[in-house]
Amino acid sequence: MSDASSPTGVCVRKRDGRVEPFNRGKLLACLVRVLHEAGHVDPPAAAEGLVETTFRHLEQAELPGPVPAPRMRELVEAVLSQLGHGTAAELLRRHAQVREHQRRQVHVAAFRRRRGRYVQRRWSKSAVVHTLRTEHGLGDPAARWLATSIETAVLRSGIRLVTTGLVRELIASELLTWGLNPALHAVASPRRPAPSQEPRRAIQPE
């Protein structure tokens, strides 16, 4: 399993409507985590087999289009249960429920100069992906990977209301962590706000 993504055309439709190739590496990491939490003796080896089984199911189904992300999760849960990993399947389900609940609890506040006040929006990982792609020139896979790390940091912090300034700092921190200079990787744009202004796209709802 050398490739992180599917080479055969199986795709997943994300919550924001984007379509991306079935990512073996991402699913593998997810399964290793829940199998470890479930007490499996060899999570990496078991996860490899489960990824292959899931991929075979997808190929044999001959789906007419991208698989919705919730349906993909249900398929993975079914594969886990059918192969005797019921505890891991339940953990996967709980993780998804908790993360979705946490997302609904978090809002982002941006200061609007014209209105003279802060405006709040629901947290949106897709907006962070958009910022990483358009303002920092990252490709979609890298932007999604970093956005997931940023979202995890926000959700684990327990903060219910974050500012766009904090989101901007988290983006810069994540870029620096991976050896990328936020200033050097910023994409010039005639409409980009001045440094003192809040980036609007970082808080747009999905």
Image: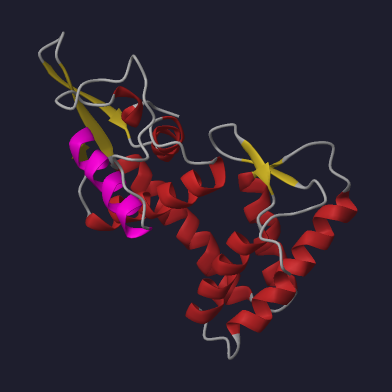
Residue 105 lies in what quarter of the image?
top left
Task: Please give left or right for residue 115 compared with residue 145 in the image.
Answer: left
Residue 118 % position (x, y): 15, 22
**Residue extending furthest bottom?**
41
Task: Please give left or right for residue 61 compared with residue 152 in the image.
Answer: right
- Say above or below: 147 vs 96: above
Give whichever of 4, 62 is nearer the camera: 4
Give whichever of 72, 190 is nearer the camera: 190
- Say above or below: 64 vs 176: above
Q: Residue at x 71, y 57 (%)?
A: 75
Residue 142 % position (x, y): 50, 48
Task: Please give left or right for residue 35 compared with residue 7 in the image.
Answer: left
Residue 89 % position (x, y): 60, 68
**Residue 173 colored magenta?**
yes
Q: Residue at x 18, y 27 (%)?
A: 195
Residue 114 lies in what quarter of the image?
top left
- Say above or below: 155 vs 115: below
Magenta residues span: 164-178
**Residue extending furthest left?**
116
Residue 85 lies in what quarter of the image?
bottom right
Give whichever of 114, 104 is nearer the camera: 114
**Residue extending furthest top?**
114
Q: Quadrant of the C terminus?
A: top left
**Residue 133 colored magenta?**
no
Q: Residue at x 47, y 41 (%)?
A: 138
Q: How many marks?
A: 0
Q: Quadrant of the N terminus?
A: bottom right
